[in-house]
């Protein structure tokens, strides 16, 4: 099978194109797509517990620790340690972090508006149904692999 005919190639190719576009957009504001993605997943009003951020983003905790350190050094977030339980840390956006978050939000809205304006709703509905099914199947396969039920050909 040619790689261009595989489902995973098409998904990865599309995501890389989107990622490059978002990074070009983010670079105009001295940031990156990854930073914008993290900022968008931190509750703007109350902050977000540090332990909840990695699962929200699908990141490994080690990668997130480096990212949060970078965001803190850049003045985009601050850590608030609970007075009751010193193990509990909430990540809160600074004013600069809120500004960068809003720019990221505008970029996401702009991209989605452009796609919705150019691709008919019926096609998007089918796309969302198919991608949801793919995600479900992949998650089922991941669970089997974790449980040791390795299959030869998925």
Image (cartoon, grey):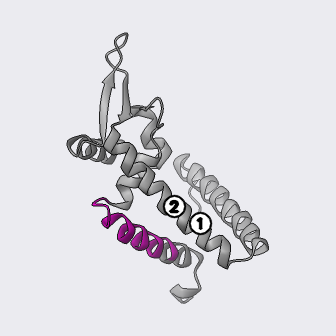
The residue at the point 52 percent across, 78 percent down is: 9
Q: Which residue carries the number 2 mark? A: 108
Identify the disc placed on residue 112.
1
- Image coordinates of residue 108 in percent, x first then y, are 51, 61
Q: Residues within 10 Å of mark 2 (few under 14, many from 20)?
A: some
Q: Determine the CA span between mark 2 and mark 1.
A: 6 Å
Vertical position of residue 84 compared to residue 80: above or below: above
In this picture, residue 120 sits left or right of residue 81? right
Magenta-drawn stretch, dominant element (helix, strand or loop): helix
Q: Are marks 2 and 1 in contact (CB under 8 Å)?
A: yes
Q: Nearer the viewer, residue 15 or 100?
A: 100
Please state, as top left, top right, bottom left or bottom right, where the C terminus lies in the image: bottom right
Q: In the rendered structure, does residue 138 fall within the stretch colored magenta?
A: no
Question: Mark 2 falls on what kind of element?
Answer: helix
Residue 1 position by quadrant: bottom right
Q: Residues within 10 Å of mark 1 (few under 14, many from 20)?
A: few
- Image coordinates of residue 99 in percent, x first then y, are 38, 48
The residue at the point 59 percent across, 61 percent down is: 151
The residue at the point 30 percent across, 59 percent down is: 31
The magenta stretch spans which residues? 14-31
* Residue at the extreme left: 73
Question: Mark 1 falls on what kind of element?
Answer: helix
Vertical position of residue 55 compared to residue 6: above or below: above
In this picture, residue 105 sits left or right of residue 38? right
* Residue at the extreme top: 84
- Image coordinates of residue 89 in percent, x first then y, are 35, 25
Identify the disc placed on residue 65.
none
Q: In the rendered structure, does residue 19 fall within the stretch colored magenta?
A: yes
* Residue at the extreme right: 122
């Amino acid at each position: 099978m040619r790689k261009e005919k595989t489902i995973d190639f098409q998904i990865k190719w599309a995501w890389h194109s989107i990622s490059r576009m978002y990074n070009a957009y983010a670079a105009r504001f001295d940031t990156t797509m990854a930073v914008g993605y993290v900022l968008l997943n931190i509750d703007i009003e109350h902050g977000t517990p540090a332990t909840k951020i990695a699962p929200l983003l699908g990141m490994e905790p080690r990668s997130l620790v480096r990212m949060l350190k970078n965001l803190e050094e850049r003045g985009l977030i601050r850590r608030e340690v609970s007075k009751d339980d010193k193990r509990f840390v909430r990540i809160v956006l600074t004013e600069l972090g809120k500004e960068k978050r809003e720019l990221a939000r505008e970029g996401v809205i702009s991209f989605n508006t452009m796609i919705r304006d150019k691709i008919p709703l019926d096609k998007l509905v089918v796309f969302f149904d198919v991608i949801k099914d793919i995600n479900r199947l992949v998650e089922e396969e991941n669970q089997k692999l974790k449980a040791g039920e390795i299959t030869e050909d998925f």
